[in-house]
Amino acid sequence: MQTVASHYEDELAQLGHSYSAACAADIDSLKLAIASTAESSMIGVGSGGSFTVASLLCSLHEAYTGRVSRPSTPLEIICSPALASSSPVFLVSAEGKNPDIVEALERARRFSPRTVHVLTNRQDSVLMEHVHALPGVKPYVFELDKKDGYLATNSLLLDAVLVARAYGELNGHSEPMPANMAALRVGNQPVDAWLDSAMPFVTEAVRRGALTVVYSPLLRPVAADLESKLSEGALLHTQLADLRSYAHGRHLWLAQRPQDCAILALVEPSLDKLWEGMRSKFPADIPTLAMPLSSVAPVHMIAGLVAQMHLVAAIGRALGKDPGRPDVPSYGREIHYANLRDVIPLPKAPGPDEEQSKYEVLGAHWPSQRNHGTMRRAAQTFADTIRAQRFKAVVFDYDGTLCSSQSKDGPPSQDVVEHLVRLARAGIVVGIASGRGGSIQTCLQEAVPQDVLPKIRLGLYNGGWISTADVPPAPPQETSEFLSHVTRIVVRLKALGVPILAHRTTHPYQVSVRFGEGIATDAMWFVIADALRQAGLDLSTMVRSKHSVDILARGVSKSALIAHIIQQDKIDPYQVLTMGDQGAWPGNDAALLEHRYSLSVDVPSRRLDRGWKLAPTEKRDVDATLWYLERMTEEGEGVFRVDLPRDRDRGSDGDA
């Protein structure tokens, strides 16, 4: 056995520190994100060591929630970004400079209305630049003290322990992480003792040049990481198969090339007997080794990851190679840093974007036919009508339209503000309707020039209070028995464990109910609605956004702002354009998108004569709003038109 100075082993010497840092980290936000996906399948995305973390995330999600989940490479999301529309996506990247993960983030976010989660170890990275630039992306940054090596061992362990802790703690700590990494065990042995017993097997596997890894499906992340390191370090040819897949023909390699075979089994108690039965039937001269983990609890998955990292180091020593510092050829770097956006085109939709969004909101999913002439004619008629019409007023929703839908208050971006100022100074009436209250007026005061504030109409508390943006809201001092009853019901639901983060009653307008980070409001709407139904209350005033459910007093509606503008500014109803992100009832912009001339930036109305999303598929929320704003052209005397492109394929850059 040769001995060389190993950069990889220097990395392994830091594992204890990385483990301790992960055990001490504050993971409350990560736990909230994971808990919010409990009712959904999950897609974990990563490359190399980050793929291992993504695989661990999905394995634990399946184990604890029963929801089938899928670890994926970035290329899978790049080629099929629609995958992100049906399941929450967690992207994992240690340093955030991998071009694959950056492009996967771009496509996942632009093709999905869901929040995209990003787990990374660098606050300052190309990936984080994109995170900050995109709406609806939630980062979880856990800094690594030292720059990691080629095989990213420390960032992998750091992130794996964070994920394992999150699931373990959410499940009530059945087997908590030990304070010291030295307490991790393989079966009934410390990791070092198991590794010592494995050395004869290592010597024989290196001599044969190949390793077959059979594993319990519940230990797939450990097997995947072992294969990744042996392949990326060019150490051994590796074949992976779960124990039963191996029995379905893969054993012929053993029969016909026994001199090339050594077999490592990753097993847990449920498959001990299956493995022992298999091993007893192998030829006696075939070297075998078991890595027996005591269970598939998170702590034992981490033990398996640590053990196989050290096994790779032993194989590297036997080969006289440093897995952590291989000689990477120039062409390897060139293919790694390919510009994926230039070489992998965006997927083409099966039909025009605007038609597909209508089919989706109508529930006309595959295998329903999507080439009805009625839909096509309605889309063309609506687009032609928008192009031909001239407008004097535009009314926007706020969250998800002018700024990212979020639980925290914040002003619109500078680009959006500049367009609002441009329209208002051209004499066009600009209105903003929102379920929020005074926080919007405060945000606008900070972002919009003082001379423009009086020109902007606000319909706060879902249109209950109407004034201009220079006037702080002052709801009347009166109470609503209906809202008081609703409040009592909400308080009772929270006491029963419904994940209500906060509720606010604003008499006489509404009760607003917010849920824990990431909790889907579509499911929670039914929980609140059923409780109100049982109490004999009217459900017709309930609406939901991406972050809250609002129960409105009778007569309160965002459409009140449209009516106010029509009456106060003497504008014809057909000269008012409205825009929102949740256009299908019970979405809280349904009233806005019921208006004859209305555009969606995400979910369209279910009506065929209004509320269409005409922006390209990959433009959602604020991106779609900007796409529309860029096409609003003033014609003088407080009039504007919307210059929509006539080509149905508008392209990913939105050019006409």
Image (cartoon, rainbow, N blue to C red):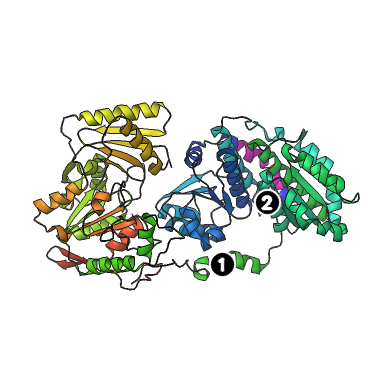
| Residue extent of the magenta highlight | 10-21
* Image x and y of residue 244, in percent: 74, 49
613 left or right of 554?
Answer: right
Residue positioned 39% across, 57% down in the render: 360
Which image quarter is the C terminus in? bottom left
Question: Which SS class for mark 1?
Answer: loop
Name the N-terminal-most of marks 1 and 2: 2
Residue positioned 56% across, 61% down in the render: 75
246 left or right of 560?
Answer: right
In the image, what residue type sits under mark 2? Answer: Ala
Say whether residue 552 is visible: yes
Residue positioned 37% across, 57% down in the render: 620
Q: Quadrant of residue 460?
A: top left
Please tell me whether mark 1 or mark 2 is closer to you in this view. 2
Residue positioned 27% across, 67% down in the render: 383
Marks 1,2: beta carbons within 8 A:
no
On whether residue 623 falls in the magenta region, the answer is no
Between the C-alphas of marks 1 and 2, the distance is 25 Å
Say whether residue 242 is visible: no
Residue placed most toward the observer, 21 or 636? 636
Toward the bottom, the furthest residue is: 647
Within-10-Å neighbours for mark 1: few <14, some 14–19, many 20+: few
* Image x and y of residue 365, in percent: 43, 57
Question: Which SS class for mark 2?
Answer: helix
Q: Main secondary structure of the magenta part?
A: helix
Residue placed most toward the observer, 40 or 548? 40
225 left or right of 2?
Answer: left
Q: Quadrant of residue 298?
A: top right
On whether residue 15 falls in the magenta region, the answer is yes
Residue to which mark 2 is pinned = 224
Disc on res. 338: 1
